[in-house]
Image (cartoon, helix red, strand yellow):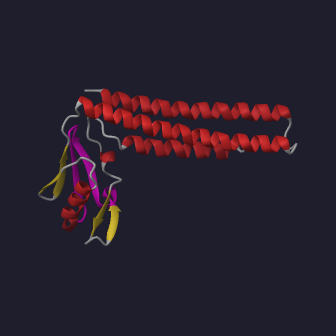
Amino acid sequence: MDEGAIRSRMQQVIALVESDVASIRTGRATPALIEKLEVAVYGGQQKLKVQELATISAPDSQTLVVDPWDKSIIGEISKGILVANVGMNPSIDGEIIRISFPPLTTEDRQKYVKLLSTKLEGARVMMRQIRGDAMHEIKKKFGAKEITEDDKFGQEKRLQGLTDEMIGKIEEMGERKKQELLQI
């Protein structure tokens, strides 16, 4: 069992979940909500992420400000955010785009908590898949007499420990986000 490779695969899942969870809207505005949105710019010739086109800041908990580096495409960025259909209504204010977030309703909060649960379950499934693949390798090596029974049990135990550690990180991340979502 190559523990380093397995840990690396599991870390990739953690990173994926972190960015995925960050994109779920909470009661406060954060740049992560829009930085990965792709918008068509320069007459639709290119699709770029908002973070590649502008500086995104949150001057307060209810507002995001998008400051494009190329002011000539401000309309296209605004339109791109609007058509991404993520529930945001950007407005152009001189040379910047402002996005105001109304406070979340209880219904919105419950919807986002449910979305969070779905994303976390997907991550747990990916972790179990990685563990399953590694378990299969261990059993195959044992069947081919490459490792002893003691080695097999030791490797399985370490693998389960690693899986538990990573799933614990996912749970922790989910709990933090859930607290953010339910905070009024």
Query: Which is nearer the eye, 108 or 41?
Result: 108
Above or below: residue 42 compared with residue 100: below
Quarter of the picture holding the C terminus? top left
User: Where's residue 23, x and y in %?
Assistant: 36, 44
Query: Which is nearer the eye, 68 or 110?
Result: 110
Residue for point 22% across, 55% down: 82
Quarter of the picture holding the N terminus? top right
User: Where's residue 176, x and y in %?
Assistant: 40, 30
Lateral position of residue 94 relative to residue 137, left or right:
left
User: Where's residue 164, x and y in %?
Assistant: 60, 30
Q: Quadrant of residue 113?
A: top left
Q: Give the farthest residue toward the right.
A: 145
Residue 8 at least partly seen: yes
User: Where's residue 77, x and y in %?
Assistant: 24, 60
Query: Which is nearer the eye, 66 or 78?
Result: 78
Number of labels in the image equals 0
Residue for point 81% across, 35% down: 151
Q: Which residues are magenta?
A: 49-70
Above or below: residue 90 compared with residue 42: above
Lateral position of residue 113 relative to residue 160, left or right:
left
Residue 1 at least partly seen: no
Residue for point 25% across, 57% down: 83
Residue for point 60% across, 46% down: 9
Q: Quadrant of residue 62?
A: top left
Membership of 54 in magenta stretch: yes
Above or below: residue 18 compared with residue 171: below
Lateral position of residue 24 relative to residue 151, left or right:
left
Membership of 43 in magenta stretch: no
Task: Name the main secondary structure of what is drawn in magenta.
Answer: strand
